[in-house]
Amino acid sequence: MVVIRVSRPDDGPRLQEIERLAGQRFREIGLDDVADHEPLPVEAHAEYAAAGRSWVAVDRADELFGFVLVDLVDGGAHVEEISVRPDRQGQGAGRALLEHVRAWAAGHGWPAVTLLTFSDVAWNRPLYEHLGFRVVPDEELGPGLQARREAEAGRGLDPTRRVCMRWDVPR
């Protein structure tokens, strides 16, 4: 069973470990540089928690196994990071986290949830499309999302392999 709760500032070290473990899957497809990326600092996780824009997936014993971090970009909710421990992937935790974000965005009157992801990685674009996200053409990106894409390219992510996706929030 997946339970979603607001993250707490002291969850940071466990969230870093989840991010490290989830990132290791990229080694399977030759993206070692992505797998080697350092997780978000504990202080940043605490800031997301304090701002109320971080949620975790836990089991009944409150054991963390997934999380999502959300920013506000171009007038909507933007998934900055979502990670689920590999041994818990495929069990609905990612979907539950994203549905929670969508409900949160609806409660704040934001029109959509966006994210940036790999277009050619099986557990990225195809998964998000299955959940209802659609690819946003580059010419339709707002300035905030354009800046995020440029920042990713500056960190070495190949922009030809990345897409922005949008999940409309029901009114």
Image (cartoon, rainbow, N blue to C red):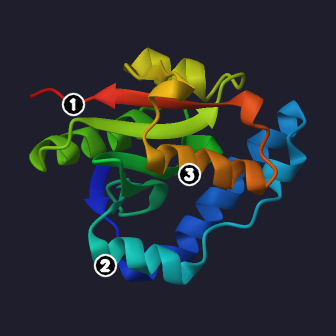
Using the image, tell me which numbered label, if any, was put on residue 50: 2
Secondary structure beneath label 1? loop
Residue 42 placement: quadrant: bottom right
Q: Which circle, 2 or 1, is nearer the viewer? A: 1
Crowd band around label 2 with a 10 angstrom C-alpha radius: few (<14), some (14–19), many (20+):
some
Secondary structure beneath label 2? helix
Across and down, in percent, residue 22 comes to 66, 49
Residue occupying the point 32% across, 63% down: 53
Residue type, label 1: Val
Specify which label sits upstream in the sequence, 3 or 1: 3
Residue type, label 3: Ala
> Does the rendering let one see residue 1?
no
> Taking 101 as reference, is 46 above or below it?
below
Secondary structure beneath label 3? helix
Using the image, tell me which numbered label, if any, was put on residue 147: 3
Q: How far apart are marks 3 and 1 (CA)?
A: 23 Å
Residue type, label 2: Ala
> Taking 148 as reference, is 122 above or below it?
above
- Pick the front one: 171 or 50: 171
